[in-house]
Image: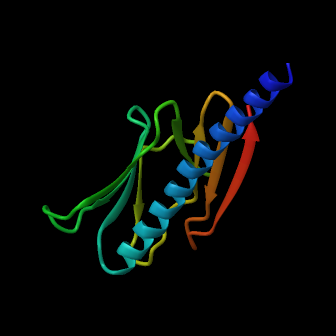
């Protein structure tokens, strides 16, 4: 019985780690989009919930590269504007590196992490919760 309890505990920690790593990747993408925007790029963050993917799309040139992060299998993605709670699928980062306030939730069956972003500064707060 103790072995099964330990196995469940390890599985939960592994799942929490996967969710936390994915949320950290999204925070890094946000920071990258802001840096690119400050360098004069027309930058959008695109949240593809169906594919569990976040992209930085550079609209400055037709041949500009796209940076993407695909979440590991079994993780879901939700993004919405704050404080309205309106779901979003894209977010423009302006030339000052600013955007609207928003938050992103990465979830699995066992764990969930929400990252709240302050659009003016890019500051973010990570909120972990067990499901």
Q: Is residue 83 visible?
A: no
Residue 12 placed where, x, y %? 71, 34
**In the image, what residue occupies the spot 29% across and 73% down?**
41
Q: Reply above or below: 12 against 23.
A: above
**In the image, what residue occupies the spot 22% across and 62% down?**
65
Seen as rendered, the residue at the extreme left is 63
**In the image, what residue occupies the spot 40% across and 31% down?**
50
Residue 26 placed where, x, y %? 50, 55
Residue 40 placed where, x, y %? 30, 79
Left or right, residue 116 beside residue 75:
right
Q: Nearer the viewer, residue 81 or 69?
A: 69
Q: Reply above or below: 43 against 16.
A: below
Q: Quadrant of residue 125?
A: bottom right
Q: Reply above or below: 130 against 23.
A: above
Residue 25 placed where, x, y %? 50, 56
For the N terminus, the image quarter is: top right
**In the image, what residue occupies the spot 56% across and 69% down?**
122
Left or right, residue 47 beside residue 116:
left
Q: Is residue 19 visible?
A: yes
Q: Quadrant of residue 3?
A: top right
**What coloring was used for the rendering?**
rainbow
Seen as rendered, the residue at the extreme bottom is 39
Q: Nearer the viewer, residue 97 or 23?
A: 23
For the C terminus, the image quarter is: top right
Left or right, residue 65 beside residue 48:
left
């Amino acid at each position: 019985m103790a072995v099964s309890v330990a196995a469940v505990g390890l599985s939960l920690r592994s799942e929490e780690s996967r969710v936390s790593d994915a949320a950290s990747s999204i925070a890094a993408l946000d920071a990258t989009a802001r840096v690119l925007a400050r360098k004069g790029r027309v930058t959008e963050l695109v949240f593809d919930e169906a594919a569990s993917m976040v992209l930085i799309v550079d609209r400055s040139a037709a041949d500009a590269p796209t940076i993407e992060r695909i979440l590991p299998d079994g993780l879901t993605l939700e993004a919405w504007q704050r404080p309205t709670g309106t779901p979003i699928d894209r977010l423009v980062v302006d030339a000052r590196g600013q955007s609207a306030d928003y938050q992103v939730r990465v979830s699995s069956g066992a764990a969930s992490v929400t990252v709240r972003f302050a659009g003016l500064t890019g500051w973010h707060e990570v909120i972990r919760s067990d499901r």
